[in-house]
Image: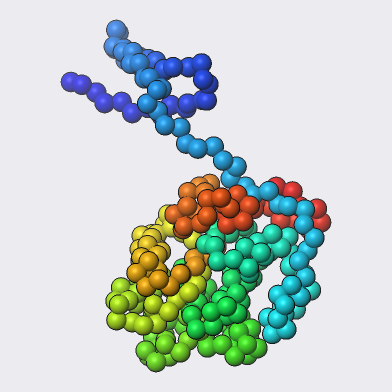
């Protein structure tokens, strides 16, 4: 009876090799062996790219660079950290989609806030949607952003989770909606009859590395649907993904619709270590 064998074979980049020979020998039966040639001409090797973004030696960006007294009052510090400094121009002075991959505690949330401030400055009638994987994370953002955006900027902030379902009027008036993937998936399905869904100008997806987990398909549907809504309504929807460092960051950034010419330095920041003093990757 024929036996099916599955091999995992490492392939090294060597232009002098044209094929591999797979030699299978049984350790139980005599003369039970076979040799199978495997030509490499049809093998497509993955694209080589540096997974980590080079952290440039930049002068720390002062908070005064926001050029808005109200925005500057949101932050108790005087300068942004190196990661925030490198992402500042892309977040605050452009409309590119972005994937920010950096360790916990490196200030990714403030990077997303820069994109939010740009939307408040340039398109105040559009909404921000923040999607967190857990209700606890959504509550944390509600507590933090209430002190910043509600108390200091006068923005309207609402929570849309399994525990809180605001009425339609509140959703229409809201400037910032914090929600979970499941709730926004259900809300956005009937987007043609919900004006507030078509008024979204920025979507921030936190912990987007969970795309490979149980809730991954829901995030995939949300991103694909929002990009489709943008194409149908002619209202550009900016997508910012926040994540820890990823092995396939470039693939994920391409899927989010980042600019391929800006991936390595701006729209796909992939930092591994953050230390006080001189920073090295």
Quadrant in the picture for the N terminus = top left
Query: With respect to residue 102, does 225 lie above or below?
Result: below
Query: With respect to residue 143, does 280 lie above or below?
Result: above
Q: Is residue 226 left or right of residue 242?
A: left
Query: With respect to residue 77, does 45 lie above or below?
Result: above
Q: Is residue 74 visible?
A: no
Colouring used for the render: rainbow
Kindly identify the residue that appears in the image at 26 percent across and 26 percent down: 4
Quadrant of the rendered structure where residue 43 is?
top left
Q: Position of residue 247 (x, y in %)?
A: 53, 46
Picture mark count: 0
Q: Position of residue 50 (x, y in %)?
A: 60, 42
Return the residue nearer the eye: 130 or 200. Answer: 200
Q: In the image as oriented, which residue stretches furthest toward the top?
A: 31
Q: Position of residue 12 (x, y in %)?
A: 51, 25
Kindly identify the residue that appears in the image at 65 percent across and 88 percent down: 152
Return the residue nearer the eye: 52 or 191. Answer: 191
Q: Position of residue 146 (x, y in %)?
A: 59, 85
Kindly identify the residue that appears in the image at 70 percent across and 81 percent down: 68
Return the residue nearer the eye: 141 or 136. Answer: 141
């Amino acid at each position: 009876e024929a036996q099916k064998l599955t091999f995992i074979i490492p392939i090294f980049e060597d232009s002098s090799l044209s094929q591999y020979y797979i030699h299978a020998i049984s350790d139980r039966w005599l003369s039970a062996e076979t040799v199978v040639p495997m030509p490499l001409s049809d093998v497509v090797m993955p694209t080589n790219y540096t997974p980590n973004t080079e952290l440039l030696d930049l002068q720390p960006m002062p908070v005064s660079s926001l050029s808005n007294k109200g925005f500057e009052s949101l932050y108790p510090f005087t300068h942004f950290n190196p990661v925030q400094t490198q992402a500042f121009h892309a977040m605050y002075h452009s409309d590119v989609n972005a994937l920010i991959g950096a360790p916990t505690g490196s200030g990714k949330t403030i990077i997303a806030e820069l994109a939010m401030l740009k939307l408040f400055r340039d398109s105040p009638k559009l909404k921000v949607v923040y999607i967190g994987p857990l209700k606890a994370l959504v509550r944390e953002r509600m507590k933090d952003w209430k002190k910043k955006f509600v108390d200091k900027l006068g923005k309207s902030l609402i929570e849309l989770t399994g525990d809180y379902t605001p009425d339609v009027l509140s959703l229409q008036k809201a400037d910032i909606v914090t929600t979970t993937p499941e709730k926004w998936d259900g809300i956005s399905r009937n987007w043609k009859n919900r004006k507030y869904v078509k008024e979204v100008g920025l979507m921030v997806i936190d912990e987007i590395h969970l795309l490979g987990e149980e809730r991954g398909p829901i995030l995939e549907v949300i991103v694909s649907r929002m990009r489709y809504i943008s194409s149908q309504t002619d209202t550009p929807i900016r997508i910012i993904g926040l994540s820890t460092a990823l092995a396939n960051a470039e693939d994920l950034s391409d899927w989010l619709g980042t600019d391929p010419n800006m991936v390595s330095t701006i729209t796909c920041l992939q930092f591994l270590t953050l230390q006080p003093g001189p920073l090295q990757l």
